[in-house]
Image (cartoon, rainbow, N blue to C red):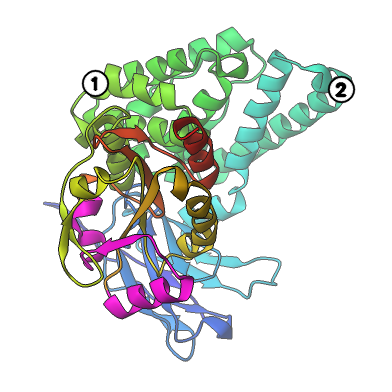
Amino acid sequence: MRFLITFLIMSSTITYSQHIYGQFMNVEVFRSKAYLYNMFQNDGKPIDETIIDSNGKFSFKKTDYTLGFYRIQLKGEEPIIIVLNPTETDVEIQVNNQNDDKPITVLQSLENIAFHRHKMLMNIYNRIEYLQFQLSFPNDEVLQKINEYENELKKFIYYSTVSLKDLQTNFSQTFTFDVLAKTMPIINSSYEDRIERFFDNKAILDSKYLHSPLMFNKISMYLNYYSGENSIDMHIAIDDILMATYDNYDVYGYCITQILSFLNRQGFEERIEYVVSEYIGDEFDLITNRTLRKQIEGRQKLKVGTIAPDIQIPDINRDKVGLHDLFKKNKLNLVMFWSSTCPHCMETIPEIKTIYESYRSAGLEVIAVSIDKKKDEWQQAIDQENLEWINISSLKGWDSESTDVYYVSYTPTFYLVDNQTTIVGRPDGKEDVIRMLNNLLR
């Protein structure tokens, strides 16, 4: 009734051997598949996978791990975070039922005892930075509750101090203590002083922290809370991070990726342009996340005003048609990349049909490029939804040429192309489609 995680690290003089096995107590996950991921360096691909047997037991085959934070993931279940340190011979964890007060029981491994005892510290750190930022730039709401904010800040600083003392006393040799100690925010200092000292410990330059929450949290905190009031100095914060990490290529690439991910989530298009122009140029390989790299590279190479790529794609009768030939027949073309197996696409299609009916007489044509693999599924969706626009697909899924040349990394993806084959819009969702159509076809 236990979960033993082990790993094998080999060097010229020392061999570390760990046996990986364990047991889940929740019978609902028996006979399910479990995946092991590196939390910060895997780009979505599992390191290993295994089947949980009829007694809840399982075993991963892989035995060689880099020092860092990992997660065990089951479909529909909360991830199980673990710390793997090759200096430990055994990491034994019992995965309890979800309704238990203690979901994970660490039976062996100082790393994981330390982490699971103090796993809330990263959230506490973020709250400390948030409260310090609010008190540095107080709005009317903060001013009305300033005592509440100050008391909450004191409480979390006290909690963090006590937690770090426990870590230092009982777990000083662990990677967990190292990470949590070096991520602790600067406290009891002015905003300007915190900016000045933020990177003083140089931890952000050490590649080993790429496999931990330290790097991710330091970047996120700096962008969120040290880019000035209302993010007015975001470009300066970006410069600070990238100039501080320029000498370590791996860290530099990771920072660029995290900065672009942050800006992408926030919709800061102009700042994405700034990072690309000032720090990337044509070296898109610096972006370590392949999906994000495809998005950013596509934004740069298929900007509004550029010529849309021309490729041949089969229609429903398997006759190849050229995109440029289709574009030239219509005043405006809405190119939609979709799939019958994409739930969000199928939810969006009725709304796109309404848009099509409203603007068809004004010269709009929809060219729906499916990335399906199975013709029957594609055909069934066309028939069920009564899609009267132009439907084309190579039926090669994500291996389609169209997804490469149009830099499609998610569905649905939209382009607006005029009859001169020029890209005139990059809508982000149906609301953006409507807004752009109103401007282009009015």
Indicate the quadrant where residue 77 lies. bottom right
Closer to the N terminus: mark 1 or mark 2? 2
Indicate the quadrant where residue 296 lies. top left
53 sits left or right of 329 in the view: right
Using the image, tell me which numbered label, if any, was put on residue 247.
1
Q: Is residue 197 magenta?
A: no
Q: Is residue 376 magenta?
A: yes
Using the image, tell me which numbered label, if any, was put on residue 409.
none
320 vs 76: above or below = above
Q: Determine the CA span between mark 1 and mark 2.
A: 43 Å
Secondary-structure class at tag 1: loop
Secondary-structure class at tag 2: helix
Residue situated in front as seen by the camera: 420 or 436: 420
The structure residue drawn at horizontal position 35% and vertical position 32%, both measured from the top left corner, is 424
What amino acid type is highlighted by mark number 2?
Answer: Asn
Counting from the top left corner in percent of width and height, residue 371 is at 29, 62
Residue situated in front as seen by the camera: 259 or 177: 259
105 sits left or right of 420 in the view: right
Label 1 crowd bin: few (<14), some (14–19), many (20+), radius 10 Å: few
Counting from the top left corner in percent of width and height, residue 82 is at 46, 58
What amino acid type is highlighted by mark number 1?
Answer: Asp
Residue placed farthest to the left in the image? 12
Q: Which residue range is magenta in the image?
A: 374-403
